[in-house]
Amino acid sequence: MTRIINKPKDTVSQVLNGVAYIHQDILQRIPKTGILLRKELTPDRVAIISGGGSGHEPAHFGYIGENMLDASVSGPIFIPPTAEEVFEAIQKTDQGKGVLLVIKNFEADVNNFLQAEKQAKEAGHNVSHVIVNDDCSVETGSFEKRRRGVAGTVFVHKILGAAASEGKSLDELVSIGEKVINSMNSLGVALSSGTSLTGETSNFTLEKDMISFGIGIHGEEGYRSEPFHSSEHLANELLNKLLVQYDDYTNKRFAILVNGLGTTTVMEQYVFSNDVKRLLKLEGVTVVYAKTGNYMTSTNMAGISLTLLEITEESWLEYLKKPTNAFAW
Amino acid sequence: MTRIINKPKDTVSQVLNGVAYIHQDILQRIPKTGILLRKELTPDRVAIISGGGSGHEPAHFGYIGENMLDASVSGPIFIPPTAEEVFEAIQKTDQGKGVLLVIKNFEADVNNFLQAEKQAKEAGHNVSHVIVNDDCSVETGSFEKRRRGVAGTVFVHKILGAAASEGKSLDELVSIGEKVINSMNSLGVALSSGTSLTGETSNFTLEKDMISFGIGIHGEEGYRSEPFHSSEHLANELLNKLLVQYDDYTNKRFAILVNGLGTTTVMEQYVFSNDVKRLLKLEGVTVVYAKTGNYMTSTNMAGISLTLLEITEESWLEYLKKPTNAFAW
């Protein structure tokens, strides 16, 4: 499938320029970098930065704005930004209250962001981080594998962003972030693999009409492939695996995020949302906040992910509901 | 390509239920109809209703909310709702100030909405309408053809919705609407045809790596097919055809809408936006408002459309910028 791009090597830079143009009221690009910076930083607030490889649009620049991020740092497709760029974003956003990095749990991302944190601390900045690992598809039995950071990351952006605007300190934000992350689980299913920009290589192989449960947002293979049956069947599989992560889930309250993985239409996202609704009702689970849309994609993968966040603090719900001008929330 | 649905015949109803569930703070479904109704109607305001066939999600329900629509009425895929359903929506939304129907210029849509208007007038409602015909791909030489209503419809929703909230009368809204529509032009290009829900039939035929300029949102054939070159080439072709609709365009101010037609990724939408930016700058055209996203899709078509709206009244820009809680704006 042809894609609307120019030279593949220019794509990431052109995306950043396009975003900076369309959303010039909210953000600006630091020329020749992967950094998009909020136009007017909120003074007297801990700054919040997120980022990672490109290919997950509108993550993360779509979350820059009031009560969310102060900057995003984008690398090449599926490759994290350099430590130098993250360090530059820290310098540009620190308002004297410190800077919090929201990192997705992939080895290269963690390495580069933590190296930037170290460098920034040496330069006198107060910096800390949280590592998001909401993907519960990976068996934790093997110490070589790790839970990945996926769509739930945007819940972390919103909750910590709103908490920061309320005046929480860097230490308080780290503590809230870790609690949120420990209360959150995501799982995705692909109907087609994403491909490279030229369409020449696929991230994984999936035969016609087959689906793969538990895929990652960089095209990491899932835990099981089978023929597609129905939206309801997908919802049932994902929910079963997600709910068992919680003890006594019928007495808990949840925020949910239905996330399109790239080329899945709005129509399909709401059919799936309707199945999730029906199944959660049958299970007696209480949903107090819900969102559906393209929040964390994997280039042109067709598929969907579902995130459950147990709301254990009333303030999290307030933070989720606080208004923002971030264009992708 | 498999799609995330259940039985195709249940899809539209399940989409409406999914939307009513996820956005229950904003809207509700009138059971067993295609009507989604704003939860709290603004009193003392002309009500605004839009709708049409399904397959264009998030149109039109995504525009229900403050400063936009009071109700949307969805029919089956690519088939407008019945006059009876539109009439019911009029009855449900009329707050005593009258009701304005925003209709896309397709014969069946116009027929059913105008029949509902007639029926409502006989029942004592004050009802009027505007017909959106922003698509400039169709040669107007033939009287059998007509300019269609496409993505620019959402600019009409926003401008008239905000004007209605400001207290404009039904007649005033019709007059504003007609001026806006006369200042607006859209054009789309497809990289793949949309298909029926089962994938068995395509709306039109397009060979691999070929694109079609001037397609309609129901899969109406375009005015020219050719091999895909680049995003810049698409932007150039669409802009050339759009700008010639305006005399002396370098001295005019425009709002632009870059619209994904279904399965086009966020990444591609911003690469294209960047090309539009560059070309408009070269032409010396002033852009005062810009949006990029999936606003008016055509099921699973891959492609993009571009809308130009000449801002001839400063108030239009204010109306575009007024906040709304409509989820797709």
Image (cartoon, coloured by chain):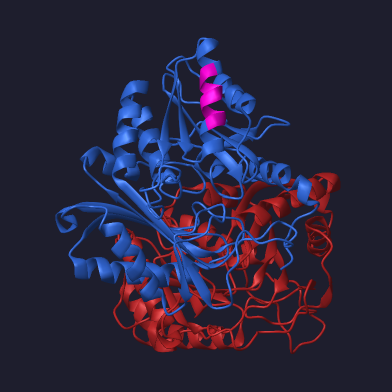
Chain colours: A red, B blue
Depth check: give the residue in front, A238 or B318: B318
Q: In the rendered image of this protein, does residue A275 appear above or below residue B265?
A: above
**Secondary structure that dominates the magenta span:** helix
Q: Position of residue B23 (x, y in %)?
A: 60, 42
Left or right of residue B173: residue B145: right
Residue B37, picture quadrant: top right
Q: Position of residue B267 (x, y in %)?
A: 48, 71
Q: In the rendered image of this protein, does residue A192 appear above or below residue A120?
A: above
- Does the stretch in magenta take in B213? no
Residue A176, picture quadrant: bottom right
- Does the stretch in magenta take in B113? yes
Depth check: give the residue in front, A89 or B174: B174
- Does residue A190 appear in this view? yes
| Tally of numbered discs | 0
Depth check: give the residue in front, A293 or A122: A293
Depth check: give the residue in front, B173 or A35: B173
Name the residue located 74 percent from the left edge and 71 percent from the top edge: A136
Name the residue located 54 percent from the left edge and 76 percent from the top edge: A103
Name the residue located 48 percent from the left edge and 61 percent from the top edge: B222
- Does residue A97 appear in this view? no
Left or right of residue A4: residue B163: left
Q: Position of residue A303 (x, y in %)?
A: 68, 67
Name the residue located 38 percent from the left edge and 47 percent from the top edge: B134
Per the rendered image, the range of residues in magenta is B111-118
Q: Position of residue A287 (x, y in %)?
A: 71, 46
The quadrant the N terminus of chain A occupies is bottom right
Q: In the rendered image of this protein, does residue B23 appear above or below residue A132?
A: above
